[in-house]
Amino acid sequence: MAERDPDPGDARARGKERLIQATESLLRSRPFEEVTVEEIAKEAKLSRPAFYYHFAGGKEQLRATLVERGLLRERPAQDTRELILETALRAFARSGISATTMDEIAAEAGVSRGTLCWHFHSKEELLAALIRHYIPHGTLQSAIAEAVQQAEEGQIDDRTALYRIVAAFHDTLMATPQRDLLRLAMLVIHSHPDAAQILARVLTENRKILISFVRRRQEQGRFRRTFAPELIVQILASIFVSRVVARGLLSQLSVRQFSREELIEQVVDLLFYGMVPCDPDKRV
């Protein structure tokens, strides 16, 4: 009996199922939004073109299939903008702004190009929205203002206030979205001046609160007058930004790795004991 020729339809079905099974496997360790087309194709042992052969609509079509089969929950419409911002932040931080296309962002987010452009008309508009959304302005400013107010009302001493301020810088700048944003900021300073101005405005507002606090303490004789108040934000930002940007390098060097508490205490001591008056005869 002659063997039946393979049915091309069966091969197509098997390829599609492999992609779905590969996606299921990847979803066990992270959310759908973080899984890329390349990773799905690799897991399924197929090529990227093969993925788009089976899912011409990209991740959006794959998502619909998974939802239809009950393998993935349907995404609320209001989450689409948030999803695009999360995806763009990862893509920009990973590949750079110029090298990342709107089509790539749409594909990785699992939305159509039309949906992306409905929310953000251009890459520049997306970048500006990204910075406004993720920059830790409100959290950082509230923490700084609260610490300054409590110190001035006598509820806490100056060192405790400085500890809380340094901790706020650490916790907001070292959080995952902000780490990616800081890496991104290094790229936009010269290439995207509008976005850089947004970052500068936020730093300026936080800077004013700290400078005013230090100056009042100098007038009261509690901080040395030779210390330049303008430096405090520059020092804090430089310490944590450099740790984020050079994180991979620092892990390769034979240097001590500090815990959160150790790092904050060291920075507080450097700043606080550099500002308070001291008796030259008692210096050690």
Image (spheres, rainbow, N blue to C red):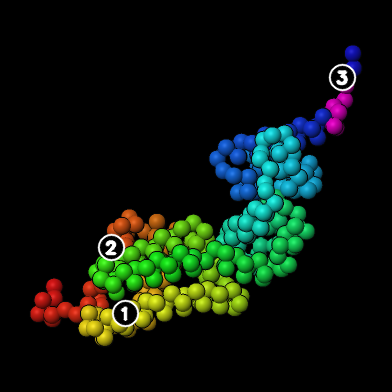
Image quadrant holding the N terminus, namely top right
Start-end of magenta stretch: 3-9
Q: In this view, does 19 lie above or below 174?
A: above
Q: Alpha-carbon distance for marks 2 and 3?
A: 76 Å
Q: Nearer the viewer, residue 140 or 255?
A: 140
Estimate the x, y position of residue 209 in percent, counting from the top left: 39, 77
Residue at figure coordinates x 34%, y 57% from the top left: 260
Residue pointed to by mark 3:
3
Residue type, numbered disc 1: Val
Which residue appears farthest toward the right when viewing the image? 2
Q: How many residues crowd around disc 2 within 10 Å: few (fewer than 14), some, or many (20 or more)?
A: some
> Relative to 242, is 4 on the left or the right?
right
Q: Which residue is drawn at 13% across and 80% down?
A: 279
| Residue identifier under label 2 | 265
Q: Characterize the local packing of mark 3: few (<14), some (14-19) or many (20 or more) Cα atoms within 10 angstroms.
A: few
Q: Where is residue 62 in the image (x, y as percent from the top left)?
A: 73, 43
Callout 2: SS = helix
Q: x, y percentage for residue 278?
A: 16, 79
Q: Residue 178 at x, y = what percent? A: 50, 62
Any magenta on residue 81?
A: no
Q: What element carries label 1?
A: helix
Q: Residue beneath label 1, please?
A: 214
Q: In which quarter of the image is residue 50?
A: top right
- The residue under the point 60% across, 65% down is 130
Task: Name the residue furthest left.
Answer: 281
Q: Does the magenta stretch include residue 7?
A: yes
Query: Count of labels shown?
Result: 3
- Identified at 52% across, 70% down, the residue is 186
Residue 141 in view in this figure: yes
- Name the front one of labels 2 and 1: 1
Q: Please, what is the three-letter code of the amino acid marked with disc 2?
A: Glu
Distance from disc 1 to disc 3, alpha carbons, whole Å, reads 87 Å
